Amino acid sequence: MPLIEIKEVTKDYPLGKTTVHALRGVSLTVEKGEFFSIVGPSGSGKTTLLNLIGCIDKPTSGDVIIDGQDVSSLNDKELTNMRLHKVGFIFQTFNLIPVLNVRENVEFPLLLMKDKSGLSRQEIKERVEKLIENVGLKDFITHKPAELSGGQRQRVAIARALVTNPAIVLADEPTANLDSETGEIILSIMRHLNETQQTTFIFSTHNPDVLKYAKRIVRLKDGKIIGEE
């Protein structure tokens, strides 16, 4: 069974007196362990599709099935649990908490889970420190976001996304605010974690230079899939 199934999904948004058709009958499947890119120009529907997969939004019509569950049938509490336990998010703006240091930012999702993580304080500490080491920030563990470069902040965001051991990590334009060299380093880290941990990565981009890292590419335009490779 695929990890993600998108079946004839549409998504409409009201904009004044008009309606924006963000997605128009999109269907695709994603298997566990894929390193998958959604490509298209601004306004093509990339972010909308990620938001549906990440249970941030619901489709206007069609089905979004994550790990065997149709998200349209879930209530708000169940959607929150889905996001917390099965999905990690990496944003182009990093979305780190300024007053927390690297360790605290990475640890934060586990604190939101309270006792549901099943981890002791020592296990949480070890997992957080291992992830920070994996993304190359061992020497910056007590630094706050303002003391880090853009690339370092994105590495913190990657570690934070992975700390709950999610089945899926969604990255919306993860290299958009980085220079090309730093962007390639970030994608290399993501690809390595995908290969070593079998975490499913789905990232959106309009930058053709990053596509050499993707194992599979779906192209969107005007809310429709126009190609796959």
Image (cartoon, rainbow, N blue to C red):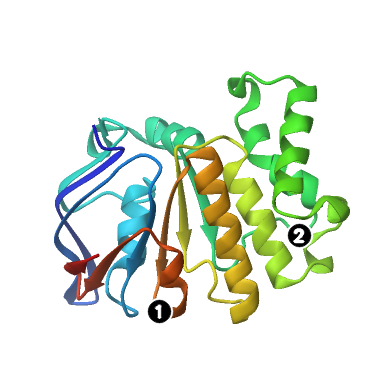
**Residue 41 visible in this rendered orientation of the protein:** yes
Which of discs 1 and 2 lies nearer the camera? The answer is: 1
Dot 1 amino acid type: Pro
Task: Return the mark for residue 98.
Answer: 2
Q: Nearer the viewer, residue 35 or 66?
A: 35
| Image marks 1 and 2: residues in contact by CB distance under 8 Å | no
Disc 2 is placed on an element classified as: loop
The relative height of residue 25 versus residue 34 in the rendered view (above or below) is below
- Dot 2: within a 10 Å radius of its alpha carbon, few (fewer than 14), some, or many (20 or more) residues? few
Residue 86 is situated, as x and y percent measured from the top left of the image, at: 45, 36
For the C terminus, the image quarter is bottom left
Disc 1 is placed on an element classified as: helix
Residue 112 is situated, as x and y percent measured from the top left of the image, at: 62, 34
The relative height of residue 63 versus residue 85 in the rendered view (above or below) is below
Quick check: 78 left or right of 17? right
Q: From the image, tell me which residue sits under label 1.
A: 208
Task: Return the mark for residue 124.
Answer: none
